[in-house]
Image (cartoon, helix red, strand yellow):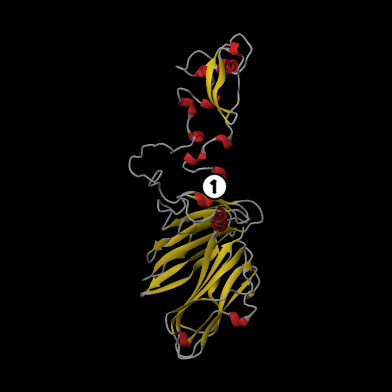
C-alpha cells in the first residue's frame, strides 16, 4: 500500500503510447471521511507524465494498481514513479509486460502475470534491507545456499560431483573397486582368499542373525539376512510400522494428508476481492463506484453488505452485474429475490453475508459493477458491498 499526501503524484510511461491500460484503486481521506474509489484509470503515455495527483487537503491510500498490456503482439516496457523520476521510484527500472499480460501491485508488492493469468514472477520494490531475514553485517550460516548456488571453482576440491576416489586423501590405498573385490571374497567359498569367510553362528527360525569369519575348510557358508517378520518389533518406539497410519504419529496435527492437499490447492488458486462503496445519504442508481475489471477466470465465493445508518422504513437492495469488455453488464442474480438486502428493521451498523448470485463464474477480462435498486425511506447512509472471488487459473 502507498500513502500519498496532498499534491503527491504518480507518474508513468510506456514504450508505446496507449498500449498499457492502468487502473489505480484506493481510498481518499478528506475531512475525516474515507472514500474508496477508482483513483485513476486510462492508458500510459510514451513519455513521462502524471497519471494521478492527490488533490488539496486530501490524503490518498493506494491499495491496488493494475497494468495490462492490450497490444495484439509484442511486449511493452513500463516505469512508474512517485513524485518525479528520482530514488523514490516504485519500480526502479523498465519492466517488461508481455502481450495480454499484466502487472499488479497490492499490499504484498508487485507481481507479473502472463496472458493466461499465471503468476510468472515478483518484482523487488525498494532497496534490500535484509538478507535471509537478518539485518546488519550478515554472515552466512548453514543452509543459506543450495549446492547449485555455490561457486565450486574456488573450492580446494572443486565440484565434488566430478571427483573420484583418487581425488581424496587420508582414506587408504585401496580403491572402491578393490574393496568390492575383497567383500566378494568374504562371502564366497572359492578363490585364493576363500579362507576368510562370513558364516552364521546363531539362528532364529532358520534365519541367520549373527555372523563370524572362519576357515572355509569346514565347508559352512551363508549369505542369508534376517527377514522383517523375524525382527522383534515390540521394543521399537513405533512397533510394527507396516500397521501404522497417519493417526499413529505424534506432532503432525489433526488434518489428514488428503485434507492438507485440498488446503494447498485452495491456497494456490488465490483469493481476492472487489469493494463497492457509497458514502453519504443513499440514492438508487447504476454503476455505483464505477466498477472493476476481473483479471482472471474466477468464481465468486462470498458477497458481503454493510449499511451504516438505517432509514425509517423499507429495505435497501443492491444488484451485481458483469459483462465482457465493451458490453454493458447484466445481473448475476437471475433470482432477483436473492439480491443482497438490508431492511430498516435490521437497524444501523448492519453487516450481512448475502446469498450467492445464480451466476458465480466470471471470465478474465470481464467487468463487474453494482446497482442500488432500492433504498429505505428517510435518510439511510453509507453503504459498502464486497465481492470475494477465487482465481480458477
User: Which image quarter: residue 59?
Assistant: bottom left
Judging depth in this view, the residue of 227 and 345 nearest the camera is 227
x 40%, y 48%: residue: 127
Give the residue at mark 1: 244
Of residues 343 and 88, the one drawn nearer to the viewer in this rendering = 343
Q: Is residue 239 visible?
A: yes
Vertical position of residue 208 compared to residue 124: above or below: above
| Residue 49 percent location from the top left of the image | 49, 59
Q: Is residue 44 visible?
A: no
Q: In the current view of this chain or complex, which residue is farthest to the left?
A: 136
Where residue 340 sits: x, y (%)?
55, 79
Which quadrant: the N terminus? bottom left
Residue 353 vertical position relative to residue 255 in the rendered view, above or below: below
Most extreme residue toward the top, as rendered? 192
Q: Is residue 84 left or right of residue 326?
A: left
Q: Which image quadrant: the C terminus?
A: bottom right
Lateral position of residue 30 relative to residue 255, left or right: left
Q: Quadrant of residue 362?
A: bottom right
Residue 378: % across, % down: 46, 90
Q: Position of residue 332 (x, y in %)?
A: 62, 75
Q: Residue at image x 54%, y 70%?
A: 302
Camera-side residue of 121 and 164: 164
Q: Is residue 274 above or below residue 341?
A: above
Near mark 1 (Cα within 10 A), the count class, few <14, some 14-19 or many ≥20, is: few
Q: Secondary structure at mark 1?
A: loop
Residue at the front extreme of this rendering: 205
128 relative position to 358: left or right = left
Amino acid at each position: 500500500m502507498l500513502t500519498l499526501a496532498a499534491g503527491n503524484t504518480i507518474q508513468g510511461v510506456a514504450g508505446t503510447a496507449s498500449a498499457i491500460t492502468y487502473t489505480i484503486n484506493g481510498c481518499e481521506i478528506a475531512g475525516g471521511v474515507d472514500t474508496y474509489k477508482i483513483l485513476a484509470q486510462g492508458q500510459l503515455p510514451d513519455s513521462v507524465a502524471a497519471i494521478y495527483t492527490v488533490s488539496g487537503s486530501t490524503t490518498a491510500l493506494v491499495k491496488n494498481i493494475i497494468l495490462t498490456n492490450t497490444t495484439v503482439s509484442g511486449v511493452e516496457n513500463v516505469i512508474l514513479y512517485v513524485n518525479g523520476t528520482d530514488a523514490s521510484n516504485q519500480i526502479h527500472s523498465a519492466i517488461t509486460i508481455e502481450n495480454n499480460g499484466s502487472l499488479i501491485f497490492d499490499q504484498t508488492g508487485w507481481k507479473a502475470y502472463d496472458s493466461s493469468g499465471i503468476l510468472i514472477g515478483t518484482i523487488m520494490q525498494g532497496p534490500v534491507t535484509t538478507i535471509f531475514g537478518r539485518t546488519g553485517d550478515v554472515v552466512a550460516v548453514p543452509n543459506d545456499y543450495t549446492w547449485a548456488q555455490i561457486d565450486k571453482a574456488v573450492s580446494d576440491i572443486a565440484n565434488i560431483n566430478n571427483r573420484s576416489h583418487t581425488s581424496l586423501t587420508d582414506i587408504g590405498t585401496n580403491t572402491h573397486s578393490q574393496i568390492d573385490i575383497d567383500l566378494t571374497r568374504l562371502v564366497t567359498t572359492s578363490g585364493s582368499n576363500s579362507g576368510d569367510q562370513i558364516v552364521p553362528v546363531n539362528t532364529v527360525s532358520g534365519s541367520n542373525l549373527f555372523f563370524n569369519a572362519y576357515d572355509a575348510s569346514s565347508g559352512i557358508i551363508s549369505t542369508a539376512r534376517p527377514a522383517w517378520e523375524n525382527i522383534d518389533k515390540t521394543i521399537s518406539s513405533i512397533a510394527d510400522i507396516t500397521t501404522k497410519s497417519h493417526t499413529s504419529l505424534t506432532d503432525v496435527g489433526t488434518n489428514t494428508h488428503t485434507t492438507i492437499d485440498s488446503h494447498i490447492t485452495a491456497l494456490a488458486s488465490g483469493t481476492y476481492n472487489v469493494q463497492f462503496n457509497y458514502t453519504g445519504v443513499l440514492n438508487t442508481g447504476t454503476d455505483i463506484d464505477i466498477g472493476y475489471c476481473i483479471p482472471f477466470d474466477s468464481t465468486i465465493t462470498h458477497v458481503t453488505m454493510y449499511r451504516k445508518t438505517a432509514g425509517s422504513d423499507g429495505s435497501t437492495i443492491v444488484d451485481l452485474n458483469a459483462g465482457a469488455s465493451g458490453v454493458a453488464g447484466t445481473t448475476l442474480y437471475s433470482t432477483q429475490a436473492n439480491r443482497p438486502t438490508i431492511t430498516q428493521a435490521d437497524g444501523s451498523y448492519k453487516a450481512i453475508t448475502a446469498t450467492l448470485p445464480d451466476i458465480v463464474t466470471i471470465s478474465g477480462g470481464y467487468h463487474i459493477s453494482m446497482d442500488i435498486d432500492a433504498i429505505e425511506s428517510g435518510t439511510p447512509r453509507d453503504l459498502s458491498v464486497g465481492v470475494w472471488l477465487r482465481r480458477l487459473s
